[in-house]
Image: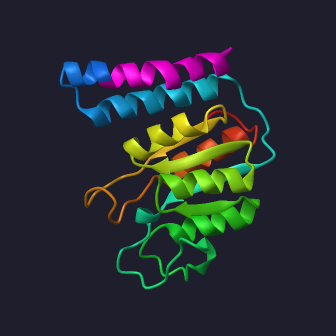
Amino acid sequence: MNHLIRGVFLKVCCPFAFGFGWLFRIKKWRLQKFMINVNNRLVLNSGPAKVKNLLLLLPHCIQNSDCKIRITRNVYNCEGCGKCIIKDFTQLAKEINLPLFVATGGTIARRIVDDTKSDAIVAVACERDLIGGLIDTYPLPVLGVTNDRPFGPCFNTSVDIEKVKDAIKFFAGKGSA
């Protein structure tokens, strides 16, 4: 039932909410954050189900902008210097044998999702990219974690890795996120 409610929410309510927000001058990012939270609640309320093919998807802006190594083709090119949290994610993905990819935008993210044939996704991105991804990937269950942007959008962003780990645990059938 939550699956159907989530579909109606993402495909019908979200576009309506943007029109409503524009009419009443509600900040778009606030609406997007609200919609991501509702999506996450609906996924979590469906109950923990052990997922075989989970995908962890990160945005390219999580890499330090001064880094000379490009990780968008292969995240494991990261040399682990510690200037950003990519090293932590590559270690986590290796430890639990989890596919980890970095996307430079929505088109690449959709291609990664199609290519990996995932059953569920833990996605990190800004509100705008997450809500677009949630709508585009429905009916796949996706838990979205918004990134922190201390230097503004798309530049040296970060994320609370514990929130990401909680989402992964949920899809591993080990409790709620």
Left or right side of 6 for 16 = left
Q: Position of residue 98 (x, y in %)?
A: 72, 58
Q: How many marks?
A: 0
Q: How is the image coloured?
A: rainbow
As drawn, 147 above or below 60: above
Residue visible at 35% across and 74% down in the picture? 65
Look at 55% across and 48% down and name the residue there: 123
Q: Which secondary structure class fits the magenta region best? A: helix
- Percent of width and height locating residue 52: 81, 46
Residue at position x 25%, y 57% in the image: 152
Q: Is residue 166 left or right of residue 27?
A: right
Would you say 83 lies left or right of 46 here? left
Relative image position of residue 108 (x, y in whole percent):
54, 58
Whether the magenta-drawn stretch holds residue 19 is answered as no
In the rendered image of this protein, does residue 97 appear above or below residue 169?
below
Q: Residue at x 65, y 51 (%)?
A: 113
Residue 17 inside the magenta-drawn segment: yes
Where residue 81 appears, as percent x and y from the top left, is 48, 82
- Which is more toward the observer, 85 or 25? 25
Which quadrant does the N terminus fall into? top right
Q: Is residue 81 above or below residue 107?
A: below
Residues drawn in magenta: 1-18
Q: Which of the 4 image quarters holds residue 142?
A: top right
What is the quadrant of residue 57 in the picture?
Answer: bottom right
Q: Report whether 143 appears left or right of 49.
A: left
Q: Quadrant of the C terminus?
A: top right
